[in-house]
Image (spheres, rainbow, N blue to C red):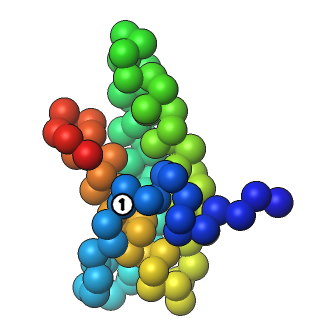
Amino acid sequence: MTDHSPTDPILANVEPVPGGLYGDQPYEAALADLRSAVAEVSAALRDDDGTRAEQLTRYQQDLGRAQLRLRPDDTAALERAHALSRTVRRYLAGGAV
């Protein structure tokens, strides 16, 4: 089994935002946020002309990995989920990551 620690290249560029990320139900909200980001990346991949396919595919894999690692009692994983979702959305909006 591959170790996907926070030092993964995928998460290395993600800055966690501490505290109060998702309100009263952080696990459920984080999971919904990740799933929403996956849907956004999938839509972008369908519309892509090939110029961003590699990066979008990496983000899709990263988001899937973050979903698998998410645990209700793991604050660091919740923070990474928030940061990754934010990073992906910034990329999709055309901003620098």
Label 1: few (<14), some or many (≥20) within 10 Å?
many
For the point 36% across and 60% down, the residue is 14
Find residue 33 and report its image quarter.
bottom left
- Amino acid found under the numbered disc labelled 1: Val
Q: Is residue 9 above or below residue 16?
A: above
Q: Position of residue 87 (x, y in %)?
A: 30, 52
Q: Nearer the viewer, residue 73 or 28?
A: 73
Q: Relative to 70, is 56 on the left or the right?
A: left
Q: Position of residue 17 (x, y in %)?
A: 27, 75
Going by the picture, which residue comes out furthest to the right? Answer: 1
Is residue 8 shown left or right of residue 12? right
Compared with residue 90, is residue 94 higher up or lower down, i.e. above or below?
above
Residue in the foreground of this view, choosing between 9 and 83: 9
Rendered view: 41 above or below 34 = above
Q: At x 42% / y 13%, what residue is drawn?
A: 50
Quadrant where the image shows the N terminus: bottom right
The residue sitting at the top extreme is 49
Residue 7 at what x, y percent from top left? 53, 65
Task: Report whether residue 33 is seen.
Answer: no
Question: Which of the 4 quarters of the picture holds residue 55?
Answer: top left
Say which residue appears at 37% left-offset and 56% top-offset. 13
Residue that badge 1 annotates? 14
